[in-house]
Image (cartoon, helix red, strand yellow):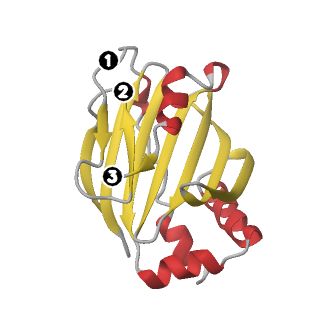
Amino acid sequence: MNIRLLRAAMVTLVFACCAFSQTKPRSVSYVFPEKSSEYVVTFPTKPIVETIFGASKSGLNAKLSIQDGALKAEVLEISKAEADGIERMTETMLASAANAHGKDNGYESLTVATGRSALGRYARMQGYKTIDNERLRFEALFQYGKHQVIILYVVCESSKYPTSYITQFFNSLKFSR
């Protein structure tokens, strides 16, 4: 599998300036996606859910503005061949693809970690970007399954990172039942 295919699964991070609303989410949680999936993640309240279409992938996207930042999750279907290709990639190849994705999106001071957890193979990318004179911290977790990739994105003012919402969001990722 080539790095381009993997990078296609790493959808561009897009967060609108309105991601920094000062409203605090209600205490009602929302599990995404609602339908059958390998993985699920919990948002602190109901996000905006959309179907996404890309050049070679389609899936579901959920995004939520929270106090001091934003949370986003994407679920993309992958073929058995793509899943097998990801499994055959070395840690260096996986890290290189994540690093290239971050650089393509203009992130600075990138760090990338790859490995395996109880949930399977993953790549985690962190970086910074200055938007409207505000230094923001971005983080993305790409969790690779047998049939899907779930990608968790967060953005927050760097001076406030990580918020309890961000920690809870990442910690809520689990296998679907």
Residue type highlighted by circle 1: Ser
Q: Which mark is residue 27?
A: 1
Crowding at dot 3, Cα within 10 Å, few <14 / some 14-19 / many 20+, comes out as few
Quarter occupied by the N terminus: bottom right
Count of marks, rendered view:
3
Earlier-in-chain disc, 3 versus 1: 1
Earlier-in-chain disc, 2 versus 1: 1
Q: Which mark is residue 72?
A: none
The mark closer to the camera, 3 or 2, is 3
Residue type highlighted by circle 3: Arg
**As rendered, which of 157 and 116 lies closer to the eye?**
116
Residue annotated with mark 2:
44
- Residue at 37% of width from left, 57% of height from top? 75
- Residue at 29% of width from left, 49% of height from top? 33
- Regarding mark 3 in the picture, which secondary structure is present there? loop
Q: Which mark is residue 177?
A: 3
- The reply to whether discs 2 and 1 touch (Cβ–Cβ < 8 Å) is yes
Distance in Å between CA atoms under marks 3 and 1: 23 Å
- The reply to whether discs 3 and 1 touch (Cβ–Cβ < 8 Å) is no
- Regarding mark 2 in the picture, which secondary structure is present there? loop
Distance in Å between CA atoms under marks 2 and 1: 6 Å
Quadrant assignment, res 63: top left
Q: Is residue 164 left or right of residue 91?
A: left
Residue type highlighted by circle 2: Pro
Question: Is any atom of residue 112 visible in this view?
Answer: yes
Q: Is residue 150 left or right of residue 63?
A: right
Tell me where residue 98 appears, x and y as whole percent.
64, 60
Distance in Å between CA atoms under marks 3 and 2: 20 Å
Crowding at dot 1, Cα within 10 Å, few <14 / some 14-19 / many 20+, comes out as few
Tell me where residue 66 appears, x and y as whole percent.
41, 24
Earlier-in-chain disc, 3 versus 2: 2
